[in-house]
Image (cartoon, rainbow, N blue to C red):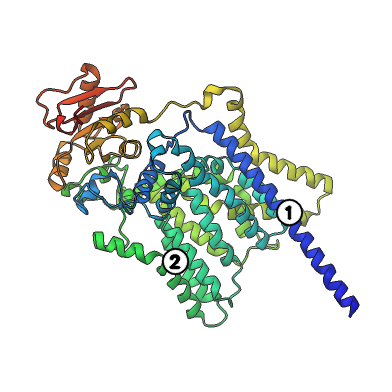
Amino acid sequence: MAESVEKQVQDFVVGIDNIGARAIRVVAWLLASVVLFFITFSLMTSYPIRLAHPDAIDYAQIAKNVSRGQGVTTNFIRPVSLRYFPSFEKHPELTNPPLYSLYLGMILKMFNAPSIMKGEIDRKIIFYGSGIFFILSVPLMLILANMIVPKNIAHLSVLFYITNTLVLAESITALPTVFLTVLFLIMLIPLASYDGDNLLKPVMVGFFLGLCYLTRYSFGLFAIPLFIFFFFRARKFKFLHAMMFLLAFLAVISPWLVRNYRLTGNPFFTLEFLKYKMFTEPFPGNLAWRSSLDSIADKNFNFFFFLRKITMGVKEHYSAILSLMGTFLTPFVIVAYFMSGTKSRFDKIKWIILLLFAIQLCLSALFRPGANGILPFFPIFTIIGVSLFIDLLDLKRVNPFIRLGLVTIFIVLNITPVLFGWMPKLFDETMHRKPRLYWEDNIQNIAVGVLPGSVILSDIPWATAWYGDLKSVWLPWGVEDYEDINKRARDIDGAYFSPSVLRYPQSEDKIWIKLYSYLYRYNKVPENNRFGWTWSTVFKNGDVFLSKSAILKQE
């Protein structure tokens, strides 16, 4: 009896020691990720530090409305959305999923609204929008890796993840990609541990897949293969397991589906769907978003142009996959799926992961080509690739010194890109002082000088909506589109142009370029212009503003 008690105490102490050792390792990786994030933040962001990506600014201005209790509404209005909601007031967001904006809205609420006008909130959005989720993804990746591979492979995989150039670059964008990666990792944990008996795990997978859908719509299609996966993997009550997964998924997304149905008549409606037409010959540039005309909406888009769009997306993904996973890691990931003769530690989920990846690859090739569309899969593929590399060394029974040398070379080859990305910027300060994309001071000066509720056109409507809190319509394709907008909603009060308007597609109406060039050259509004705009100002950086005199505040 005494020996039994003594053994229990000993086992308890050993367990405490193991927990302490694991905690130390997790803390060490967290500290490493924090250091790498702040190095990237200090070297790779422009000065002054501001949001740079249009999509990040778009999410931020939606979040600002959320923080004010105005719901998921937008001040950045795409002309095509006026076909579904013909009003500028409390215009609903019909393009982006809501979850990331709701989260950012809570962040803005925490730090209060006044600092938004000064641009100081941009740094906080970068950190809390993507930086903190990069850090949180590290322990989640460790948990997942420890479930399917030995500890040494898990830690080596995390090293490759936190030193990946594109992952670090994404961590300072304030885009929802890293946020989505965290949700996807959480979803993979119960999926990887599902043994066919535990009914709670399909529910957990369904719940987090629903959150993924509310962050990126394309993840909603994962529900079909996962439903089949749970049906065949369950040992008993197969249909019950699959239905519990599906019901959890639908329970999470149903409020948003109801909202979309009430607004548009389609529960799965999103203007993102129009992206498959964009940047093609029938729909050059962003024409599908920048026109509200029936003739554009009903324009034919035949299979030939669809095939060309797919081809261009696949071509871009070919380089994106190599740049994301690295030239040296990618072959190990590919071979790991088809090589026989090695002991696979991820057989439970590797084929369902590959199927989900194939779905996302096809959809993002059509709608959102680029590395950020597939980045959520990078952690699990890193684990798979590193696992095969170590398995091959184990099979060959390599000499310990040679083994250490090979592992060292493998590490150096995979972290070299980030070192080459950092080194020049450490020695040349001007290299990371990029030119300012948006001059928020100009936008804010205009915003304080016009009456509340004024509506303007702009070639950078995301920036005028965020920094100036102005209702901003994306520059219509031409005069016919402009007049259609006035009929659907109301007359537009003015326009804010930046030099970026000169880079708009040459196939569109030249009226805006001519108007901008005249203003910049003569510093005055053309007389008797068709828009009724009579007042203007030209800024030193090339931005111009013109409007009706009626919207100007009287001093």
Q: Earlier in the sequence, mark 1 or mark 2?
A: 1
Is any atom of residue 391 visible in this view? no
Picture residue at 90% right of the left edge, 76% below the top: 3
Could you tell me the amino acid type at mark 2? Ala
Residue 476 image point, x, y percent: 22, 39
- The residue that label 2 is drawn on is 223
For the N terminus, the image quarter is: bottom right
Residue 109 image point, x, y percent: 42, 48
Vertical arrangement, residue 128 with respect to residue 117, above or below: below
Picture residue at 22% right of the left edge, 54% below the top: 84
- The residue that label 1 is drawn on is 152
Give SS at disc 2: helix
Residue farthest front in this picture: 555
Between 416 and 113, the one lying in front of the other is 113
Residue 69 image point, x, y percent: 34, 52
Could you tell me the amino acid type at mark 1? Asn
Residue farthest bottom in this picture: 237
Image quarter of residue 99: bottom left
Between 208 and 223, the one lying in front of the other is 208
Between 454 and 39, the one lying in front of the other is 454
